[in-house]
Image (cartoon, rainbow, N blue to C red):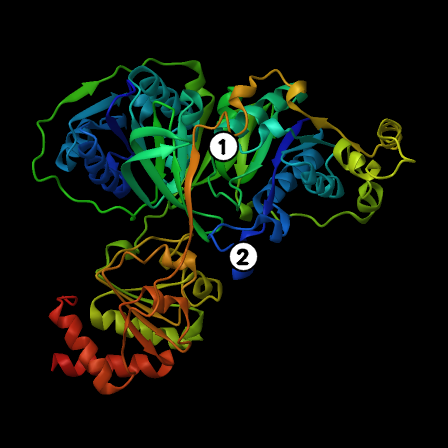
């Protein structure tokens, strides 16, 4: 037996007092991980005027929130955030720390892992707690960090057997977010911000954001087209179908590269990860990079001219045929049902 | 004047993996994959060369890897790097990002005299994006990741534009600093023909030892001196050259370990085939309605 703690920490990524979805997704996962090793779940909130956020995390099953609130932390900056988080880890030695694999998470987590000499696995698609035998040694309750590697051609399970702290980043949309059925009483531990000259080595002089109007992640139905759709003209049919079904339109990387659709609607490893109730893949062959972004969908319909296309391997329903013929027929059939 | 160190990596070309390179046990046969210059590192080198052209200074490219990684360093010379170093040792093998950044930071400290460190945002074999920030942390210097543009360098400060979620930010940074750059921030220049001719025979100690192997007429020591005299010697940095704890290097020094590797095999054939006819599609829609998929 080791003397490691059983704490699971989740970094709450926030902007203007609003948390990123991925943070709540990680809390839901973190709750399960903590339960399976009889541990506690803690949220770590850094920012300014964010006490309400710390309280909010209790809806997702947190046992305790660690809050560092100071005007110098109003916006995310690498130096103060990593310095403060590292010192918290060095003081408390949590067993697991989870970050969203966002631009911020991927900037912050490696710096903390380096400072605290912790293992860190990037872009995990699954996390589990399990007993492991590694090099003839028995380990209890290790974190299995499962991620695609080698351009998505293999799935690797990474472990951090001997270190007190196991860290991982997880992509947005991969884990399911759900409210806790039995939320704990709010318990916020405030940690004082002590300034340090290194915090000021980098200053933000300008920031520009375009609010993302498109949100295919929360669409219940997604009609997604690939290179096989053939043209921007043909893509119009997919728009029509998506509208009819009350869904959103999306595309594969090949469709984005071909200019059929915008990047913000790209599903897959270099785009968005989605898990809708229904995913209709039209003219998408189903490269691993694409599948990684949609294979958790509840129902998948594949429409492709090639009966051997890999997409059929993960589909619930397969239609072999040309999109230009199948889609209008689908639209017609659906309209008939509505009559 | 601004001196730059560029971190480059030779990687297997994962963008072009076919079934042929997958072994029966599902692992990748690296030997069958062509080795390439990590695409974002190429851009890192390009930005460093642009800084040199605009402000003066020196560009040093370094790589950690097996002896054959000298290929990548030769390519750095073809593009215009002033100096290159091959960081290689069996003790460094099997390193995860933490152990890699430990060695890299020690090598950088040994080389010294830098204002900027450039690296690609991530390498295409692991896609972790961790080595840059971890190296910066070990060097105790700040970092800027996801760099889109070096707006300006002035009085040992840098104005840098980086990507953030749904936008960008411009940062004012004290130097020295480590930057990890995005692919779209520049276009890598082609090899200079002049430099290619000049450096195509540049060799590291290991390259030379390989030449000598099985040729009793050649002596490694003599050749090394000859290559040095001609300015064609690629210096190596090994564990012995660095002030490091070898327990923190390579597989031994890596907190993360690969427990299991599986190839991605599709289930296949488990789906229900739907005929692309009016009736076929109609029954599919009925089925989905029964499952409450719509509305």
Q: CA distance from mark 1 to mark 2?
A: 23 Å
Mark 2: few/some/many CA within 10 Å (<14, 14-19, 20+): some
In the image, residue A36 sits, relative to residue B280, either above or below, namely above
In the image, residue A339 sits, relative to residue B101, either above or below, namely below
Helix, strand or loop for disc 1: helix
Residue at 62% across, 19% down: B109
Which quadrant of the figure contains the C terminus of chain A?
Answer: bottom left
Q: Which mark is residue B97?
A: 1
Please give left or right for residue B210 compared with residue B142 in the image: right
Mark 1: few/some/many CA within 10 Å (<14, 14-19, 20+): many
Q: Chain of mark 1?
A: B
Q: Quadrant of residue B52?
A: top right
Please give left or right for residue B120 compared with residue A133 in the image: right
Helix, strand or loop for disc 2: loop
Q: Which mark is residue B17?
A: 2
| Relative image position of residue A88 (x, y in whole percent) | 31, 19
Q: Are marks 1 and 2 in contact (CB under 8 Å)?
A: no
| Relative image position of residue B16 (x, y in whole percent) | 56, 57
Which is nearer the eye, B201 or B223? B223
| Relative image position of residue A243 (x, y in whole percent) | 24, 70
């Amino acid at each position: 037996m080791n003397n490691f703690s059983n704490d699971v920490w989740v970094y709450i990524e926030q902007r203007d007092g609003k948390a990123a979805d991925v943070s709540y997704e990680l809390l839901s996962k973190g709750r399960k991980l903590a339960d399976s090793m009889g541990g506690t779940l803690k949220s770590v909130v850094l920012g300014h005027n964010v006490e309400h956020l710390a309280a909010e995390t209790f809806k997702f099953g947190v046992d305790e929130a660690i809050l560092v609130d100071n005007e110098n932390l109003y916006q995310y900056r690498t130096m103060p955030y990593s310095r403060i988080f590292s010192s918290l880890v060095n003081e408390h030695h949590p067993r697991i720390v989870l970050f969203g694999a966002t631009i911020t998470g991927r900037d912050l987590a490696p710096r903390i892992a380096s400072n605290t000499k912790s293992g860190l696995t990037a872009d995990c698609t699954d996390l589990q707690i399990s007993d492991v035998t590694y090099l003839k040694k028995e380990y209890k309750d290790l974190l299995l960090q499962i991620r695609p590697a080698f351009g998505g051609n293999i799935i690797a399970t990474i472990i951090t057997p001997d270190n007190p702290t196991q860290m991982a980043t997880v992509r947005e949309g991969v884990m399911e977010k759900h409210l806790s059925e039995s939320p704990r009483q709010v318990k916020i531990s405030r940690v004082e911000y002590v300034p340090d000259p290194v915090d000021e080595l980098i200053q933000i002089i300008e920031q520009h954001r375009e609010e993302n109007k498109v949100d295919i992640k929360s669409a219940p139905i997604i009609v997604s087209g690939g290179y096989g759709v053939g043209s921007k003209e043909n893509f119009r049919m997919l728009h029509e179908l998506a509208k009819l079904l009350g869904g959103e339109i999306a595309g594969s990387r090949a469709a984005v590269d071909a200019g059929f659709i915008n990047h913000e609607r790209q599903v897959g490893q270099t785009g968005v990860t989605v898990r809708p109730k229904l995913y209709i893949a039209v003219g998408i062959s189903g490269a691993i990079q694409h599948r990684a972004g949609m294979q958790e969908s509840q129902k998948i319909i594949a429409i492709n001219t090639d009966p051997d296309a890999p997409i059929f391997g993960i589909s619930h329903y397969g239609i072999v045929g040309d999109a230009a013929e199948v889609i209008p027929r689908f639209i017609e059939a659906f309209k008939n049902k509505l009559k | 004047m601004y001196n730059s160190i560029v971190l480059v990596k030779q990687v297997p070309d994962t963008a072009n993996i076919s079934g042929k390179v997958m072994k029966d046990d599902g692992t990748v046969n690296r030997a069958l994959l062509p080795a390439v210059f990590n695409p974002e590192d190429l851009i890192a080198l390009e930005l460093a060369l642009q800084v040199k052209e605009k402000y003066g200074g020196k560009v040093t490219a370094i790589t950690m890897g097996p002896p054959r990684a000298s290929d990548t360093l030769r390519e750095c010379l073809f593009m215009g790097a002033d100096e290159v170093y091959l960081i290689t040792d069996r003790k460094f093998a099997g390193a995860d990002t933490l152990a890699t950044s430990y060695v890299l930071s020690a090598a950088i400290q040994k080389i010294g005299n830098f204002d900027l460190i450039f690296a690609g945002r991530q390498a295409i074999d692991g896609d972790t994006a961790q080595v840059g920030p971890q190296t910066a942390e070990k060097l105790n210097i700040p970092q800027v990741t996801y760099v889109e543009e070096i707006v300006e360098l002035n009085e040992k400060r840098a104005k840098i534009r980086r990507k953030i979620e749904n936008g960008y930010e411009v940062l004012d940074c004290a130097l020295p600093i480590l930057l990890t750059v995005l692919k779209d921030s520049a276009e890598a220049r082609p090899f200079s023909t002049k430099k290619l001719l000049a450096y195509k025979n540049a060799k590291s100690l290991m390259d030379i030892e390989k030449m000598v192997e099985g040729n009793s007429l050649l002596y490694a020591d003599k050749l090394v001196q000859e290559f040095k005299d001609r300015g064609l010697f690629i210096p190596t940095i090994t564990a012995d050259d660095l002030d490091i704890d070898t327990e923190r290097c390579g597989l031994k020094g890596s907190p993360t370990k690969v427990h299991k590797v599986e190839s991605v095999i599709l289930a296949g054939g488990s789906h229900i085939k739907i005929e692309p006819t009016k009736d076929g599609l109609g029954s599919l829609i009925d089925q989905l309605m029964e499952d409450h998929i719509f509305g």
